[in-house]
Image (cartoon, rainbow, N blue to C red):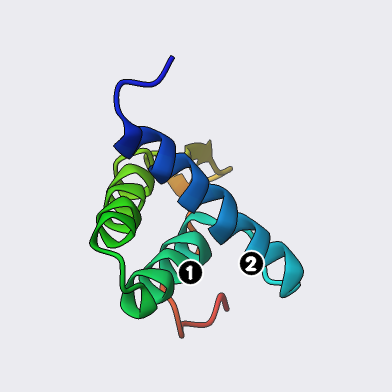
Amino acid sequence: MYQKDEDILTDIIFGEAILALLRGDAPVSNASLIQQLQQMAAVEKVPAKQRACQLAIAEVRNNRPAPPKPVMHRVRGRDNITHLFTSEGPPDGAKKH
């Protein structure tokens, strides 16, 4: 099942990080998990556990889902002008109207 002891330790570190997030009522997301693993790696004194934290961080970063592609809708108005609408919305800080 496991290739090495390092894989087992990495899975244990994952579990500890997720439990820490749940106990702290923090949201469980890729970003919060990476942040928790970085905090754990910073205070860890055992080199093998530090390495397991870094491997876990790399695994989370490599398994992030791709951002969704924007959906574009074309609507032709009465005056035969095509209007384009996307699912992205306005840029941050910009108003819709």
In this orientation, which residue lies closer to the viewer: 30 or 65?
A: 30
Q: Looking at the image, which is closer to me, 71 or 23? A: 23
Q: Residue at x 46, y 63 (%)?
A: 31
What residue is pinned by disc 2?
Answer: 20
Quick one: quadrant of the N terminus? Answer: top left
Q: Point out residue 77 in the picture as x, y percentages from the top left corner.
A: 55, 44
**Residue 12 seen in render:** yes
- Image coordinates of residue 26 in percent, x first then y, are 68, 71
- Amino acid on which the number 2 mark rests in the picture: Ala
Q: Is residue 55 left or right of residue 21?
A: left
Q: Secondary structure at mark 1?
A: helix
Kind of residue at badge 1: Gln
The circle drawn on residue 36 is: 1
Q: What residue is drawn where x is 64% and y is 67%?
A: 20
Residues packed near mark 2 inside 10 Å, few (<14), some (14 to 19) or many (20 plus): some
Per the model, the C-alpha gap separating discs 1 and 2 is 8 Å
Secondary structure beneath dot 2 equals helix
Left or right: where 26 falls relative to 50: right
